[in-house]
Image (spheres, rainbow, N blue to C red):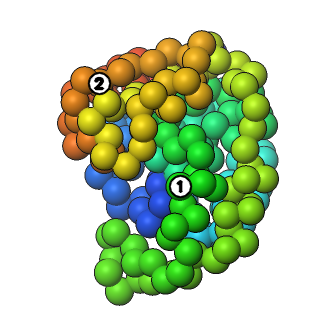
Amino acid sequence: MAITHLLYLHGFRSSPQSAKARQVAARVHADHPDVTWWCPQLPPSPQAAMNMVLQGISAWPQAAMAVVGSSLGGFYATSVAQAVGCSAVMLNPAVHPARDLAKYIGEQVSWHDPNERFFFEPAFVDQLRALETGPLLHPEKCFAVIAKGDEVLDWREMTARYAGARIKLLEGSDHALTDFDAHIDEVFDFLDLLPGL
């Protein structure tokens, strides 16, 4: 069944203005104009972010939707996929965000708008811990693009987390996947979106 609804979840301190989000959006609009596309600005609270996302997709057809997530968004995408059983693509996904983001408690600045600030609260770490899920329920529906050159996350943790899923392991690259152009075709092949007329 072709995918008719696509959700994109950005990473920590990021936004729908991220390079990868804009690249995916452009491809969807150009080649798959009938696909419902949603890339929300996620609130800093992980619990609020997941509540917003699950509410936003509550009327979507679960068998015909997919989610793409980058970094912390990859962690969220995994939670969504585990909850609804949909296909998911993770781009350098955060595996242990409760551990890794604990050092970011305090005021943070948005990557794409230096004037936008938010406070990362200690409670958010507990919320991340509460969102952790066990082994993948449908590894065959998951595709992870993982860079050994990621300067933020450990590629070994990422590959272990997505054991059984399809994995594209890049020898170099970086956390932002600045070479995403070279991998976007494979991502879209996996997603099997409803083609445009």
User: Which residue is found at the position 26% from the left and 41% from the top?
Assistant: 174
- Which residue sits at x=32%, y=40%? 150
Q: Which quarter of the rendered picture does the C terminus lie within?
A: top left
The disc at residue 149 is none
Which residue: 52% across, 44% down? 94
The amino acid beneath tag 1 is Asp
The residue labelled by disc 1 is 100
Would residue 44 be found to the left or right of residue 107 on screen?
right
Residue nearer the viewer, 102 or 91: 102
- Looking at marks 2 and 1 on the same chain, the residue that comes earlier in the sequence is marked by 1
Instruction: Say above or below: 82 vs 57.
Output: above
Q: In the rendered image of this protein, does residue 144 appear above or below residue 79? A: above
What residue sits right under mark 2 in the picture?
A: 170
Q: Is residue 180 above or below residue 115?
A: above
What is the distance, in whole Å, between disc 2 and disc 1 at their CAs?
22 Å
**Residue ranking furthest to the bottom:** 115
Q: Residue 81, percent across and down?
A: 68, 34
x, y percentage for residue 195? Answer: 44, 23
Identify the element where label 2 is drawn.
strand
In the figure, is residue 131 to the left or right of 169?
right
Q: Nearer the viewer, residue 154 or 28?
A: 154
Q: Secondary structure at mark 1?
A: helix
Pinpoint residue 2: horizontal percent, then vertical percent: 57, 20
